[in-house]
Image (cartoon, rainbow, N blue to C red):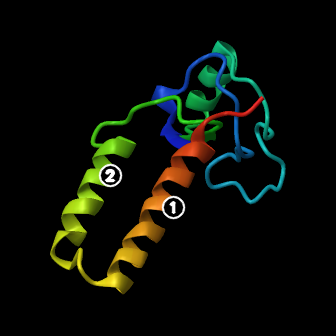
Amino acid sequence: MQNIPINYAQKGMILATEVFQPGSTSTMPVCGKGVVLTESLIERMVRIEIKTICVEGHPVSLPGELSLEEQLALLDRRFRKVNDVPRMIEIKEMFRKCLVRSKEDEVPHG
């Protein structure tokens, strides 16, 4: 799932979480989890000043966001001075697995 600014929302995206009106104390969501976005629904959310939504998958590349390959290269650079320390190699591998798993979780299933 990915949090995106509302201006990145597109018809056909699926909400990964409920959307609530900003500043509202109501427990009633504006939209429920699993709702497929339409043009009119996006326009309604803009009108009621919803700033961000959480959608399934990872459909948008946001400015400044690193790809998995870039994140793994950065991880290698950060651990380059301790490549001969077994415990640090284990820690690096744990981080690598977490990064890969997080990207796999962003791919919509179904």
The residue at 33%/53% (across/down) is 72
> In the rendered image, is residue 51 in sight?
no
Residues 54 and 104: in front is 104
Above or below, 100 relative to 35: below
Residue 95 x, y percent position in the rendering = 43, 67
Report how far apart the C-alphas of labels 1 and 2 lie in the structure: 11 Å
Quadrant, the C terminus: top right
Q: Residues within 10 Å of mark 2 (few under 14, many from 20)?
A: some
Residue 95 lies left or right of residue 67; in this view the side is: right
Residue 29 visible in the displayed image? yes
- Examine the rendered structure and indicate whether residue 22 appears above or below residue 46: below
Percent x, y for residue 55? 63, 37
Q: Please identify the residue farthest to the right as the structure is shown.
A: 28
The residue carrying mark 1 is 98
Disc 1 marks a residue whose amino acid type is Cys
For the residue labelled by badge 2, is the local secondary structure a helix, a strand or a loop? helix
Q: Which residue is mark 2?
A: 71
Label 1 crowd (10 A; few <14 / some 14-19 / many >=20): few
Q: Are marks 1 and 2 in contact (CB under 8 Å)?
A: no
Q: Position of residue 83 (x, y in %)?
A: 24, 74
Q: Secondary structure at mark 1?
A: helix
Residue at left offset 66%, top offset 18%: 12
Relative depth, front residue between 10 and 19 = 10
Amino acid type, residue under disc 2 in the picture: Gln
Q: Is residue 54 above or below residue 36?
A: below
Residue at the spot 33% in from the left edge and 43% down from the top edge: 69
Q: Judge left or right: residue 50 versus residue 89.
A: right
Task: Find residue 26 and name its label.
Answer: none
In this rendering, position of residue 66 left or right of residue 104:
left
